[in-house]
Amino acid sequence: MEEEREVLRKAAKRFVGETLVNRFRFVADHQRRFGVKGLCTLLGIARSSFYC
């Protein structure tokens, strides 16, 4: 669990200032492992935007 948190923390830092497309792509690539809700919250995007 701690390893997953560390990966997500690094991802959040990496995506600061990135385009929404890159953030959405990251969510799509990792949604099975981490869940859409948590990833969207972490990356500062609305879940409803991801599903559009």
Image (cartoon, rainbow, N blue to C red):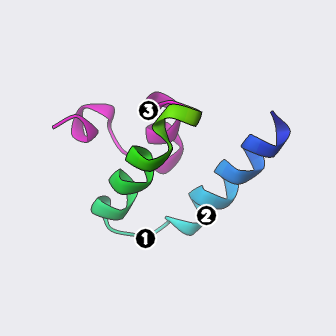
Classed neighbour count for the residue bearing mark 2: other residues with Cα under 10 Å, few (<14), some (14–19), many (≥20): few
Q: Any magenta on residue 36?
A: yes
Residue 9 sits above or below residue 52 on the image: below
- Quadrant where the N terminus is found in the figure: top right
Q: Which stretch is magenta?
A: 35-52
Secondary structure of residue under mark 3: helix
Visible residue check, residue 44: no
Whether tag 3 and tag 1 are in contact, CB under 8 A, the answer is: no
Q: Main secondary structure of the magenta part?
A: helix
Marks 3 and 1, the one that precedes in the sequence: 1
Residue sticking out furthest to the right: 2
Mark 3 or 1, which is nearer the eye? 3
Q: Which residue is mark 3?
A: 36
Whether tag 3 and tag 2 are in contact, CB under 8 A, the answer is: no
> Looking at numbered disc 2 in the image, what kind of residue is underneath it?
Lys
Visible residue check, residue 47: yes
Q: Which residue is mark 1?
A: 17
Mark 3 or 2, which is nearer the eye? 3
Residue 34 sits above or below residue 30 on the image: above
The residue positioned 32% from the left and 33% from the top of the image is 47
- Quadrant where the C terminus is found in the figure: top left
Alpha carbon distance from label 3 to label 1: 20 Å
Instruction: Report whether 24 appears left or right of 39.
Output: left
The residue positioned 81% from the left and 45% from the top of the image is 3
> Looking at numbered disc 3 in the image, what kind of residue is underneath it?
Val
> Looking at numbered disc 1 in the image, what kind of residue is underneath it?
Gly
Task: Tell me where residue 29 appears, x and y as whole percent.
Answer: 44, 49
Q: Which residue is mark 2?
A: 13
The residue positioned 28% from the left and 61% from the top of the image is 21
Q: Any magenta on residue 3?
A: no
